[in-house]
Image: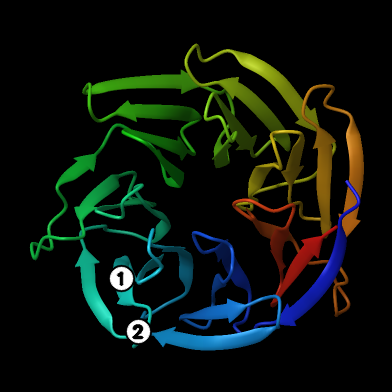
Amino acid sequence: MDLKCVATINCEQGAIRAVRFNVDGEYCLTCGSDKKIKLWNPYKELCLKTYAGHGDCVMDTCGSCDSSELVSCGADKSVVIWDVSDGRVKRRLRQHAATVNCVRYNEDSSVVVSGSNDNTVCCWDTRSRNNSPIQVLKEAKDSITNVLVIGHQILTGSLDCFLRIYDIRMGNLDADFIGKPISCISSTQDNMCTLVSCTDSTLKLMDKQKGELLNEYTGHTVGDYFIENCVFHNDSTIISGSTCGNLWCWDFVSAKLIEKLKHNNKGSFTQSVNSICTHPSKKVLITSCGPCIYLWSE
């Protein structure tokens, strides 16, 4: 792996819920329990802008395809679209009846997809003035923990143990029973496989088309936390956070543990590594642990 921590930034946002690179990986966004979102240049350890307007903890955030907008969601049950340059709220979308855990743009940022503890996934038209969702997906029987938007497909992970793939163009739904509550999902770069984190501290690599289990990665601890995973750099390495303060790295094919990257926790107790984001083109990784984000590079 040969990854080293090249920067540690205390974001001063309480516990960081999510860290996300923008579309070209030049900047990153953090959101936390202080109800704010911050825009960073992580390579210079520089905070560029702060966005305030949520009424409670911000759970997730995502930048648009041209970096002119960002969307966020939180425990105040709202989805908020922001203008990046002047920091104003462009839209405040309210349909969910509980905490909104995850939010994503589609490829051209014309649609926002959000998943909530109210068991629903909402699709919002970002170009319309109508603040009602254009579609509500109600098939889940428990909280939506993660959503992915890949082309015309929406992938959702839920605590009801199902990985669901909605084909919006064809009007199809494929539901794969994973057997354990799902805390996070991510995709390989070729979009042929889905990596699923379960609350029994296993990572399962699923064939997206056939729903078959291809590989399993174990050793880390997840517990009841929403611990994120990712497939790193040319689909060669599987990476997951953990509750023990380490970043766990496995070989994609053999499922052997390659490395455990330790985060330098400042304090008397170990904090979870809960959020991970990979650079879109370089061998660079950014993680969050407690109030800090960590930039990893060769």
Q: Where is residue 228 in the image (x, y as percent from the top left)?
A: 63, 49
Secondary structure under tag 2 reads loop
Badge 2 or badge 1: first in the primary sequence: 2
* Residue placed most toward the observer, 211 or 278: 278
Query: Cα distance, mark 2 to mark 1?
Result: 9 Å
Mark 2 and 1 residues: CB-CB less than 8 Å, in contact?
yes
Using residue 247 as the reference point, say whether residue 80 is left or right of it: left
Task: Say above or below: 296 vs 209.
Answer: below
Q: Residue 208 carries which label?
A: none
Write down the residue under mark 1.
Answer: 80
Q: What residue type is labelled 2?
A: Gly
Q: Position of residue 148 (x, y in %)?
A: 44, 42
Question: What is the quadrant of the C terminus in the image?
Answer: bottom right
Using residue 173 as the reference point, say whether residue 215 is left or right of it: right
The residue that appears at 16% across and 60% down in the rendered structure is: 127
Using residue 261 as the reference point, say whether residue 9 is left or right of it: left
How many numbered marks are there?
Answer: 2
Q: Which amino acid does label 1 sit on?
A: Val
Write down the residue under mark 2.
Answer: 53
Q: Where is residue 250 in the image (x, y as percent from the top left)?
A: 83, 36
Q: Position of residue 248 (x, y in %)?
A: 82, 46
Task: Say above or below: 265 vs 120.
Answer: below
- Label 1: few (<14), some or many (≥20) within 10 Å? many
Residue 217 found in image quarter: top right
Q: Does residue 163 appear in the picture of this structure?
A: yes
Secondary structure under tag 1 reads strand
The residue that appears at 58% across and 12% down in the rendered structure is: 212
Q: Does residue 12 appear in the picture of this structure?
A: no
The residue that appears at 65% across and 44% down in the rendered structure is: 230
- Residue furthest to the left in view is 130
Task: Say above or below: 263 vs 120.
Answer: below
